[in-house]
Image (cartoon, rainbow, N blue to C red):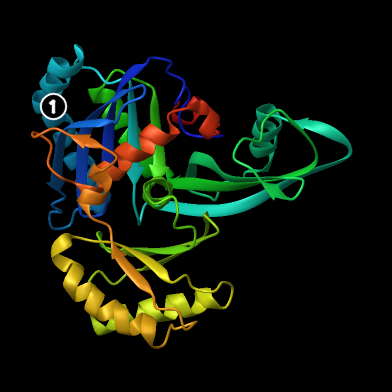
């Protein structure tokens, strides 16, 4: 069962959403508006650093900063939302939680019968409810169907078709339970909506990148923006593996060695793609490219094809998301906006609901 109920079920043609991004170093928030048939509009953004006092646990500092951020969003952002939409309240809240407080996993569930059957959402929901194993101390935040195969063929519109066998590929987000409860309690103390979704940051970014770059089906997403560098491997448009490097000093010798080691381990199971998407601060791009290009051309070279290291820029996402002059250009919040737009239709995502976890 997942964290919150009712998400993605709002039938309004114009919607507003509050976006919250939580990393080890900062928390950020934004208000966005969606009109059916148009680009989403990012109306207001705010990012605050997490300042950890001596002897304080980082999660305590994070929750305190989140509370300060929430008050700022209400004071500064809500009036902007009111002027734009006629209401200062958001319809939904989406919260992205990053390492070290999140875990992402991928699994495949198979369905097969001797006689043909109609493949439905109810079959999928029932199977996932019975077959999801939640690690101790974790809370199931979100499950997304990222691929469906019917009678051996991948399809984007699987429901209602008659099949002999089917498979679904499920991307699951787990959040540390005490973090999930703390975040939910903080936000519910500030806002009235219960229409809330928590999702692992790595899962959200993969799904947003899939939308932003639909023709790149084999990629490595290398994210160095936080204290933990994450490596997300995508094969045939599907998220297949995640590795993390704890050294927070990108380009150091130790960081480079860990990257090579992690990727070398991945190559034992999968050929490395030649396209690398780089998520980092724009000021870090030249130095990171200088480090990664010889690494990919040397120890990690798997073919004669030249690799493409593509820094993901704010300008790439602004082709798909409109931004007002008040909102600053925050890449993660733009990716969150893009994620929400694509997945706001219930047809495109399967969620499981268990609001009782918090009681």
Residue 268: give x, y in percent of width and height: 57, 78
Quick check: 303 above or below 186? below
Q: Quadrant of the N terminus?
A: top right
Residue 283, can we see it? yes
Q: Nearer the viewer, residue 101 or 126?
A: 126
Residue 152: give x, y in percent of width and height: 74, 50
Quick check: 5 above or below 138? above
Residue 318: give x, y in percent of width and height: 23, 43
**Residue at the image position 27 percent from the left and 64 percent from the top:** 224
Left or right: 289, with 301 as reference point: left
**Residue at the image position 29 percent from the left and 17 percent from the top:** 192
**Residue at the image position 41 percent from the left and 42 percent from the top:** 199
**Residue at the image position 13 percent from the left and 32 percent from the top:** 324
Most extreme residue toward the right is 114
Residue 182, can we see it? no
* Residue receiving disc 1: 77
- How many C-alpha atoms fall within 10 Å of the one at disc 1: few (<14), some, or many (≥20)? many
Q: How many numbered markers are drawn?
A: 1
Determine the image quadrant of residue 336: top left
Q: Of helix, strand and loop, which one carries label 1?
A: helix
Determine the image quadrant of residue 24: bottom left
Left or right: 309, with 63 as reference point: right
Q: Quadrant of the C terminus?
A: top left
Quick check: 223 above or below 204? below
Most extreme residue toward the bottom is 298
Residue 246: give x, y in percent of width and height: 33, 69
């Amino acid at each position: 069962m997942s964290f919150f109920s009712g998400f993605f079920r709002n039938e309004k043609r114009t919607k507003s959403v509050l976006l919250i991004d939580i990393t080890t170093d900062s928390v950020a928030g934004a208000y966005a508006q969606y009109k059916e048939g148009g680009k989403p509009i990012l109306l207001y953004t705010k990012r605050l650093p997490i300042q950890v006092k001596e002897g304080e646990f980082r999660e305590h500092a994070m929750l305190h900063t989140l509370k300060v951020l929430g008050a700022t969003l209400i004071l500064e952002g809500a009036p902007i939302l009111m002027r734009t939409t006629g209401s200062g309240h958001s319809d939904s809240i989406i919260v992205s939680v990053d390492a070290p407080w999140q875990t992402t996993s991928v699994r495949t569930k198979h369905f097969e019968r001797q006689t043909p059957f109609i493949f439905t959402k109810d079959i999928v929901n029932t199977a996932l409810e019975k077959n999801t194993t939640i690690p101790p101390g974790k809370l199931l935040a979100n499950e997304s169907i990222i691929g469906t195969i019917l009678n051996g063929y991948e399809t984007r519109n699987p429901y209602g078709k008659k099949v002999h066998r089917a498979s679904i590929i499920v991307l699951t987000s787990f959040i540390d339970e005490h973090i999930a409860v703390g975040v939910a309690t903080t936000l519910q103390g500030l806002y009235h909506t219960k229409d809330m979704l928590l999702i692992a940051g790595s899962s959200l970014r993969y799904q947003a990148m899939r939308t932003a770059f639909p023709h790149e089906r084999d990629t490595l997403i290398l994210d160095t923006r936080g204290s933990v560098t994450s490596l997300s491997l995508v094969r045939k448009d599907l998220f297949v593996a995640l590795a993390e490097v704890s050294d927070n000093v990108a380009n150091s010798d130790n960081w480079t060695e860990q990257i090579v080691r992690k990727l070398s381990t991945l190559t034992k199971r999968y050929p490395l793609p030649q396209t690398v998407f780089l998520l980092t601060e724009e000021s870090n791009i030249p130095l990171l490219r200088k480090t990664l290009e010889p690494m990919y051309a040397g120890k990690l070279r798997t073919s004669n094809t030249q690799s493409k290291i593509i820094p993901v820029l704010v300008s790439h996402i602004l082709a798909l998301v409109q931004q007002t002059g008040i909102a600053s250009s925050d890449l993660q919040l733009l990716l969150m906006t893009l994620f929400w737009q694509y997945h706001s239709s219930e047809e495109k995502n399967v969620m499981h609901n268990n609001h009782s976890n918090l009681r």
